[in-house]
Amino acid sequence: MLDIAFIRQNADTVRAAIKNKRVVLDLDTLLAADKERRDVLLEIEKRRARKNEIAQLIPKASKEERPVLIEEGKAVKVALEQLEPSLTAAQRAYDDLMLRVPSLPRPEVPLGASEDDNVEIRKVGTPRAFPFKAKDHVELMTLHKMVDWDGPRKYAGGRSYALMGAGALLELAVTRLAVDTLVERGLTIVIPPVMVRERAMTGTGFFPLGREEAYAISADELFLVGTSEVPLVSLHCDETLDAASLPIRYAGVSNCFRREAGASGKDTKGLYRVHQFTKVEQVVFCMPDEQVAEKEHYQLLGNAEAILEKLEIPYRVALACTGEIGLGQTRKHEVESWMPGRNDGKGAYNETHSCSTLGDFQARRSNIRVRLPDGTLGYPYTLNNTAIASPRILIPLLENHQNEDGSVTLPKALVPYMNGVTVLRPRAL
RNA sequence: GGAGGGGUGGCCGAGUGGUCUAAGGCACCGGUUUUGAAAACCGGCGAGGGUUAACGCCCUCCAAGAGUUCGAAUCUCUUCCCCUCCGCCA
């Protein structure tokens, strides 16, 4: 969310952001709604002022004056009752449009419409040249009996799966490795609620535009979160933070739920795109200062890279273009891990992490403020980045570390988390 | 799930239909005093919005929403949250 005063004064800048971010929104409709809302408000406030005046006069009025004032009070009340619905309507229209205004991309964000316009920053690690025919994760996991593919699809629907045996152990292991890495780096671990109210979804920017992406628990008016970013940011909703308490750095561990509406038929094979997964997510609140935020941003990125390096997975980092960054994001880096089995076995870099700065977008929507050193109130900046998301990360993990016989040599860092096992061997049928 | 008690400014807390423009205290900030500090005394001290060149003026906010009334922190209804007890339960 942007400040309406800012929008009024910088309409062209905002218009450009709307266009570059490919958001569907007519800014003039918003500006008109804002004008309408203020016009009606002015009319109503005039009458409310009179209403208050009359209420104060009545107790002091003489016997003769009193009935006259009460009559006028009644008339003002009726007038207000007639005007108020139009204020409610104007306010609602305005609020709805305001929630659709994107934040402004940082100057370094490249202009572009699709991921082809993202700018590669660096590649780390070199994809292996396999001297044998490499298997993809579906083959490997089937071979190791790491997944039950069929049972869950019967009782839980498409894109369902059950991690079994070594597959389940691997998820716990990479999760714990990520958690330990982040705790060591000073983040506070949080296991938050995964069912939240609408305000948390709206407050973090996932609603109203991403509504169809979330699972709704209608009986209780709750929603399943698609990332623990939602409850972690909401942890401080309606609060005024002390400047001294910033930065606040959290690492959330949770299951994440995504309907993948609009992705039907896409990535249906294997565990790349699923409805339910486990994720360790980093969330930071910092002072509203671009330089501070930038430093935090690269720290979050560095944390994710450190985890990938521990897992010995080759990856690349790309700066997402304007068309690829979300409504609230002002800058986003994607970390793409090398997955040898993708792209018909030719291999491809695919997104496993996403590192974003959101400026004050979420803080404004979630009503999170910070007392600045000069005594005034401001909105803290928020940032987030994936630390690990499983099972997606198991794809590059297994595919990159496989051997010709289908066994998988675990990266050293993971061995302690797998109870000392160094090589996973296919289970005999 | 059942019964009961609560929710007032950063915190504590008074307030049960009209001078509530929310008392008082604590905390905080400024000043006087002091070598400095403390204490004492004096003053200041919430947020959001509208309007204005500015000073200022106005509106809204006593958990949230709706209602009664000329007028609501106060009365009614609904919801949320906290506490106590009972029930159920990993």
Image: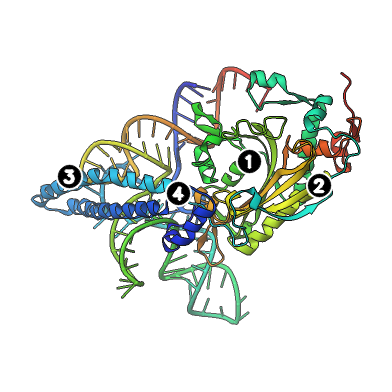
Question: In the structure shown, which secondary structural element does the residue marked by tag 2 occupy?
Answer: loop
The residue where tag 1 is placed is: A228
Looking at the rendering, which quadrant does residue A297 occupy? Answer: bottom right
Residue at image position (72%, 30%) is A270
Query: Which of the 4 image quadrants contains residue A78?
Result: top left
In the displayed structure, A415 sits above or below A41; it is above
Q: Earlier in the sequence, mark 2 or mark 1?
A: 1
Q: Is residue A407 left or right of residue A31?
A: right
Type of the residue with mark 1: Ser
Q: Image point 80% across, 36% down: which residue?
A: A173
Q: Are marks 2 and 4 on the same chain?
A: yes
Residue designated by label 3:
A74
Looking at the rendered image, the disc whose residue lies closer to the viewer, 4 or 3, is: 4
Label 4 resides on the chain identified as A
Placement of A166 over or under A65, stated as above or below: above
CA distance separating discs 1 and 3: 52 Å
Quote the CA–CA distance across marks 4 and 3. 42 Å
